[in-house]
Amino acid sequence: MVLLMQPIDNHPFGLNGRTALITGGTQGVGAAIAKSIAAAGADVILHGLTVDQHALASQAACRTYGVRCEVLAIDLSLPQPEVTQQLLQAIDTLGWQVDLLVNNAGTYIDQPFLEMDPERFEKTMRINVASGYYLTQAFARRWVREKVDGRVLFTGSINGILAEADHVAYDCSKGAVAAMVRSLCVALAPRGIRVNSLAPGLVRTPLTNVVIDDPAFDDWMSLHTPTGKVPDSAVCGPPAVFLLSDAAAHIHGQTLLVDGGMSVWQQPDLPQRWRDSMPASNDG
């Protein structure tokens, strides 16, 4: 027996009556956002590269809230804007009207800058930047034509404002997302379409667990993050719902960082065990 968890009606953070498309929504941050959107009452279309066990598990989790949830598998690294048309046609086949777009699909296939090859760089930009650009354009055209108050949420990254030496391509792509959100706000807010971004710091996902589970990583997190923690990707869900909800009606073109304070710590402290090993001050 499946226990259905009913969303709250008429709540300022509720999304009842809406339908969301979440690209890259079958696992990781995308799945966390999708589950929170479903909990807020919206029907959900999960996009992923394949319909695998992760996709089916995320679909089942969303359906426990009594909403509709379907999965679509399309490779967003293929040439644009043709791949956007494939995704739109698949959605039209469902007969659902999407009014919440979450551009979450992303890739992290970086190499050191001096070794980066054009194919990897261009694939990073196609998935992380171009897919969101063309999907937003396609849905905005529909929403303007049909007078729908659409809402767009991009998943950016702390890498959009803080750099890493060996991740130039990824940093470029996330910096582009932050700039695109600002420009889309100016272009679309007068049309009644709201655009914002959620920028996670380091959270646990299938892509990051290999790094996070390295024992030496605790020292790095203690050095760079006030909380000293790497949370599960579920922490991204509620802020995403807020930015899509009526409660954020006057928030446009903004990037909300969900990073444990990493982005605001100008002079990171030394880990406690390092401070304990330092000689005591002898200044008289």
Image (cartoon, helix red, strand yellow):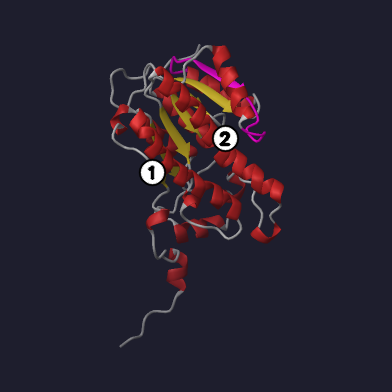
* Residue 68 screen position, x and y as percent: 48, 15
Q: Which residues are magenta?
A: 64-80
Structural distance between the alpha carbons of marks 1 and 2: 21 Å
Instruction: Using the rendered view, name the quadrant where residue 240 is placed.
Output: top left
* Residue at position x 43%, y 22% in the image: 143
Q: Secondary structure at mark 2?
A: helix
Q: Is residue 70 magenta?
A: yes
- Point out the residue furthest to the bottom here: 284
Rendered position, 66 above or below 261: above
Whether residue 67 appears in this view of the structure is: yes
Rendered position, 272 above or below 230: below
* Residue 114 screen position, x and y as percent: 68, 61
* Residue 252 screen position, x and y as percent: 34, 38
* Residue at position x 43%, y 64% in the image: 272
Q: Secondary structure at mark 1?
A: strand
Instruction: Give the residue type at disc 1.
Output: Leu
Horizontally, residue 112 falls left or right of residue 156, namely right
* Residue at position x 38%, y 43% in the image: 256
* Residue at position x 55%, y 47% in the image: 173
Crowding at mark 1 (Cα within 10 Å: few <14, some 14-19, many 20+): some
Crowding at mark 2 (Cα within 10 Å: few <14, some 14-19, many 20+): many
* Residue 97 screen position, x and y as percent: 47, 16
Instruction: Using the rendered view, name the quadrant where residue 105 is placed.
Output: top right
Indicate which disc residue 125 carries.
none
Q: Quadrant of the C terminus?
A: bottom left
Instruction: Give the residue type at disc 2.
Output: Ser
Q: Is residue 78 magenta?
A: yes
Q: Which residue is mark 2?
A: 131
Give the camera-side residue of 220 and 121: 121
Q: Which residue is mark 1?
A: 256
Camera-nearest label, 1 or 2: 2
